Amino acid sequence: MERRICLAKSTCLHLLNRETEEVELFGNSIIRLRNEIKHCGICHNISDHEICEICSSTKREKDVICVVEDTRDVMAVENTSQYFGVYHVLGGLISPMDGVGPSDLYIDSLVQRVATTPVKEVILALSATMEGDTTLFYLYKKLKEFQIPITTIAKGIAFGGELEYADEITLGRSIVTRVPYENSIIK
């Protein structure tokens, strides 16, 4: 949240030094963005159409669903160029402390999607936080009845990170969820 406030302040200060026409163009672009961008009717990602490009693509594996918190996570996964399935954007994470429960998220539509379309795997790609873990556990309980593989992304030490600087939870999870070396080699 603090990072967003800094970005907003920086943007405001930048706009104060711009020509009036440029600021008006920027403002009109934001209004157009708000009016023209909607959520995909299938996955809840942002789109300028009823169904987003990913869901409507014939090149995507429609039977593999990667569940993410928000659109930024879709962008992050897409930037890896390693995933070729489709997404389901929850719109947040379960956070009782913030008053966010399962009914505030797009969880029911995920369950409905898994129940009514052929799905061979659901990948839960959520943040390694208490809220992320709470949401993972809740989703697992809701989806396990469909008897399909429910996987999570690996959690561990960042590439280039040194063990001595890793927090205990991350390092502990990395050890507990270790995989055979031959499984970690990109082929």
Image: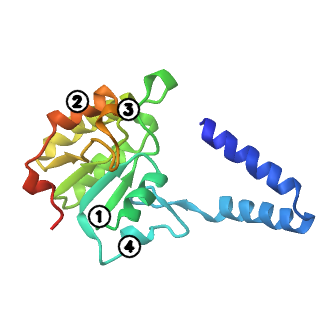
Q: Quadrant of residue 168?
A: top left
The residue wearing badge 1 is 83
Local crowd at mark 1 within 10 Å, few (<14), some, or many (≥20)? few
Q: Quadrant of residue 93?
A: top left
The residue wearing badge 3 is 129
Circle 1: residue type: Tyr
The residue wearing badge 2 is 172
163 or 136: nearer the viewer? 163
> Which mark is first along the chain, 1 or 2?
1
Camera-near label (2 vs 3) is: 2
> Which mark is first along the chain, 3 or 1?
1
Instruction: Give the residue displayed 23% in from the left and 52% down from the top.
Output: 122
The residue wearing badge 4 is 56
Local crowd at mark 4 within 10 Å, few (<14), some, or many (≥20)? few
139 or 68: nearer the viewer? 68
Q: Are marks 4 and 3 in contact (CB under 8 Å)?
A: no
Instruction: Give the residue displayed 24% in from the left and 46% down from the top.
Output: 154
In the picture, the quarter occupied by the C terminus is bottom left
Circle 4: residue type: Ser
> Which mark is first along the chain, 4 or 1?
4
Could you give the CA–CA distance between mark 2 and mark 3, rounded to whole angstroms? 14 Å
23 w.r.t. 171: above or below: below
62 w.r.t. 103: above or below: below
Q: Is residue 22 left or right of residue 135?
A: right
> Which mark is first along the chain, 3 or 4?
4
Q: Secondary structure at mark 4?
A: helix
